[in-house]
Amino acid sequence: MTEESERLTFPEGFIWGASTSAYQIEGATHEDGRGESVWDTFSRLPGAIAGGDTADVACDHYHRCREDVALMAELGLKAYRFSIAWPRVLPQGTGAVNEAGLDFYDRLVDALLAAGIEPFATLYHWDLPQAQQDAGGWPDRAIVEAFVHYADVVSRRLGDRVHYWATHNEPWVVAFPGHALGDRPPALRSWQAALNAAHHLLLAHGRAVPVLRANGDARTQVGIVLNTLWVDAASDSPEDRAAARRFDGYFNRWFFDPLFKGAYPADMLDFYAPDAPDVQPGDMVAIATPLDFLGINYYNRNVIGAGQEVDRLQVRREDPPGEYTEMGWEVYPPGFYNLLRWVHQEYRPGTIYVTENGAAFPDAIAADGQVHDPRRVAFLRGYLAAAHRAMQEGVPLRGYFVWSLLDNFEWRHGFSKRFGLIYVDYPTQRRIIKDSGRWYASVIRQNGFDAPAGE
């Protein structure tokens, strides 16, 4: 440590982890009784996925899970956040259980526990069974009971060993890009469908929470994972400030307010009329069922002004000067600090985990056979410093999960974007721990790191 740096130490027991999702890494989409998902269907649409890529093989994690758990152990991970594929467990969404699918997650959980790694399971990370979509999908209220049944099936099998459950990952993505903007499954363009989908996602969460608790034990913790943006106004003009507030309502408050305040934000209900969701008696009480933790996924801020870029919202995005990742996302750690502070001050969750944070950069295998990714190391250092600062000011952050453990199928971008701590050579499935993975392993060992003074 030099005079120009300072040691940032995290509290004892802080959980250091990494995240993945089933569809992005498992592959084996047509093996052992797995049913079709909406992403399988979407991926076959011409031009839907960059390069015509599919997740049929992805990282082949279904066959290589023990190898991947060994890599997690080599990194020293304390926890691993993964998702369970609904169509692998219930190929038709409801009805007959596919025991072979549950057996895979049995093996994964047992391997994690044997390696001393705490499993954090997410029930829904976007891969809805196609049969469930055909029956009406998330805009149809009947899906709520289907999801609760799925949660019951999985937690009856795994609840004796999995103690951390998230119901949904990023319901905003499922609801709005999938149902209003048309660029994710099921590729609809209906704001009414999107708002009903959002409501049913939240209601399914609320109704599943007591089921997950009942199938667990005294250690069981249940939460939800929300994607978040820090939103700054493009200027101090009333029009830009109103646009930024509206965009924050669309992206953040539409999900935070029901979960923590038991009501949708009034300004957004007025704005969305007459497309506002069909809320029935008791719905909001169920949605606001108290959480054991909140998962926050954070990647970037948005600078928003009034405009017509997203016509229904009447906003535009601006890109300030600075560094951007391969996804076109600004590298701006102060936004992360601001977001964590805002969530703490506005909603007071008792426990927060950062369940995703990371960056895509153009990684390649160097002449020495290694993958050198100094920009990702710098990214992680900056964002962890911002998280540490927020914790020093009272934010109840108890753990941090890098996105992602592995390079993987990055949804519409196919295999063109790499987020992993571990490089995957897709033709051979060879894994190489990147410099960022080695750096993160050192952070875990030391429960902290040296940061430039002032970060």
Image (tube, helix red, strand yellow):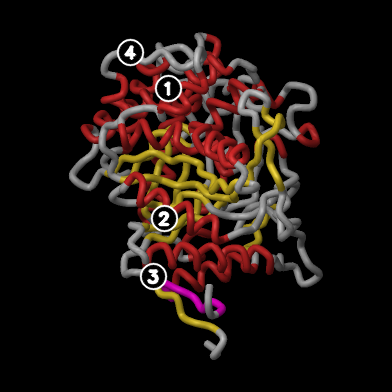
Q: Nearer the viewer, mark 3 or mark 1?
A: 1
Q: Nearer the viewer, mark 2 or mark 4?
A: 2
Q: Residues within 10 Å of mark 4 (few under 14, many from 20)?
A: few
Badges 3 and 1: C-beta atoms under 8 Å apart?
A: no
Q: In the image, is residue 365 above or below residue 310? A: below
Q: Position of residue 226 (x, y in %)?
A: 46, 40
Residue occupied by mark 4: 280
Gap between marks 3 and 4, in whole Å?
44 Å
Q: Position of residue 45 (x, y in %)?
A: 74, 21
Q: Secondary structure at mark 2?
A: helix
Residue occupied by mark 2: 341
In the displayed structure image, the side of residue 139 where residue 393 appears, left or right: left
Q: Secondary structure at mark 1?
A: helix
Q: What range of the chain is rendered magenta?
A: 446-452
* Frontmost residue, 128 versus 191: 191
Q: In the image, is residue 374 above or below residue 185? A: below
Residue occupied by mark 1: 199
Residue 10 circle label: 3
Q: In the image, what residue occupies the spot 33% across and 62% down?
A: 394
Identity, as a three-letter code, of the amino acid under mark 3: Phe
Residue 277 circle label: none
Can you name the residue that lies furthest to the bottom here?
Answer: 3
Q: Position of residue 237 (x, y in %)?
A: 62, 43
Q: Residues within 10 Å of mark 2 (few under 14, many from 20)?
A: many
